[in-house]
Amino acid sequence: MSSKDAGTDLQARIAAADEALSTALDARAAAVRELLEFRRDHADAYVPMEDDASTIRRAIERAQSFPAAEVDAVFREVLGATASLEAERRVAYGGERGGFAELAARRHFGHAASLVCVADVQAVIDEVLAGRAAFGVLPFETSSDGAVTATLNGLANYEVSICAERTVAADYHLLSQTGNVFDIEKIYGPAAGLAAAGRYLLTTFPRATLLDVPSVRVAAELALTDHGAGALSIEPDEEVGLRLVAKSVQDEHGRHTRFAIVGRELPSRTGRDRTVVAMALGDRPGALHAVLAPFADRSINLTRLESRPARGSGIRYRFFVEMDGHITDRPLVTALDRVRELCPMVKVLGSYPRPD
């Protein structure tokens, strides 16, 4: 076979794969619609759809040439789009528009989800409890400051559960109209971003004016109309009309934020799960040792243990424990049964597929 014929054959294989992909997407959408109709006509025979985590894990296991991280991203978009056939998937997150919580929501739920920005952790929980949002995205842990107390207390005090988690890098990038470092006379960014990249900005742009704006989205909008302006962004290629000046301009690298995806139901067991539990201990010597022993006796791996003051509850401290396993696993069931005999308060905050 000549080189030209070989190239033509490869192009034909790619075209055939594209056609098969399009056909498969359409077939999935049709099957989802049929399942929804079946549910409406047979209310007494409810058939649940497979959870997203299991679907994505099986897709990654089958993929040989396609990068695993991209399989995850593609399938989240597909699952989010077909989920919207049933009802709009509304997701609440707290903080600034265009910030890291929104980034975590987009990466987890895909672009078909409808995102709503609210003020803070409590507002996110309120949206989920009221049924105005199917899911919420809460900051759970930062690599610099540890667990987020407001989220831990919210999960302990209200009937929402962690059903997944998503970690994003806490990176900032500098964009502008031209992408030319020498054009920048002012830099827009949120206060947190300007602080995170403070040394870099002052060293690289000693004459530039740093301007604090409410969010990276506002920064991008201002830079779009200003030839001499730069904008801090959390994604290097996010904003249409702006070019990358410098990537990862924050002063400290390797920082990240772990977000908890919360809802009203616990996901089913996958065999690779994580469970988070809140416990209140009695005020006596050896109390912590006593409640941890049932986990050690059953070879349950505890991956995190923290305590927080429990204000206004009559309990001095709550302990938050993360462990490997699902709440339906027999060793975990029996361990928690024993812990409940020892503690005045035990609450499962989440039991969900453990991220790879």
Image: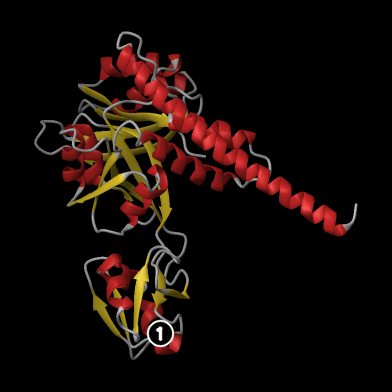
Q: Which residue is labeled 1 in the image?
A: 203
- Residue in front for this viewpoint, 51 or 10: 10
The answer to whether 210 is drawn above or below residue 213 in the figure is below
Instruction: Tell me which corner region of the image, top left, top right, bottom left or bottom right, holds residue 288.
Output: top left
- Residue in front for this viewpoint, 52 or 9: 9
Q: Position of residue 85 (x, y in %)?
A: 35, 34
With 252 as the anchor, is 290 left or right in this view?
Answer: left
As drawn, the residue found furthest toward the right would be: 1
Q: Position of residue 236 (x, y in %)?
A: 45, 66
- Residue in front for this viewpoint, 73 or 209: 73
Count of residue discs: 1
User: Could one spot residue 191 in this view of the protein?
Assistant: yes
Q: Position of residue 87 (x, y in %)?
A: 29, 33
- Characterize the local packing of mark 1: few (<14), some (14-19) or many (20 or more) Cα atoms within 10 angstroms: few
Look at 38% across and 36% down and name the residue there.
164
With 42 as the anchor, is 344 left or right in this view?
Answer: left
Look at 31% across and 59% down and name the residue there.
99
User: Could one spot residue 145 in this view of the protein?
Assistant: no
- Residue in front for this viewpoint, 331 or 121: 121
Q: Position of residue 30 (x, y in %)?
A: 45, 29
Instruction: Tell me which corner region of the image, top left, top right, bottom left or bottom right, holds residue 229.
Output: bottom left
Given the image, on which type of amino acid does mark 1 rest?
Thr
Q: Secondary structure at mark 1?
A: helix
The answer to whether 180 is drawn above or below residue 346 in the figure is below
Look at 34% across and 86% down and name the residue there.
228
Here the colouring is secondary structure
With 253 as the anchor, is 210 left or right in this view?
Answer: left
Look at 37% across and 16% down and name the residue there.
38
The answer to whether 81 is drawn above or below residue 334 in the figure is below
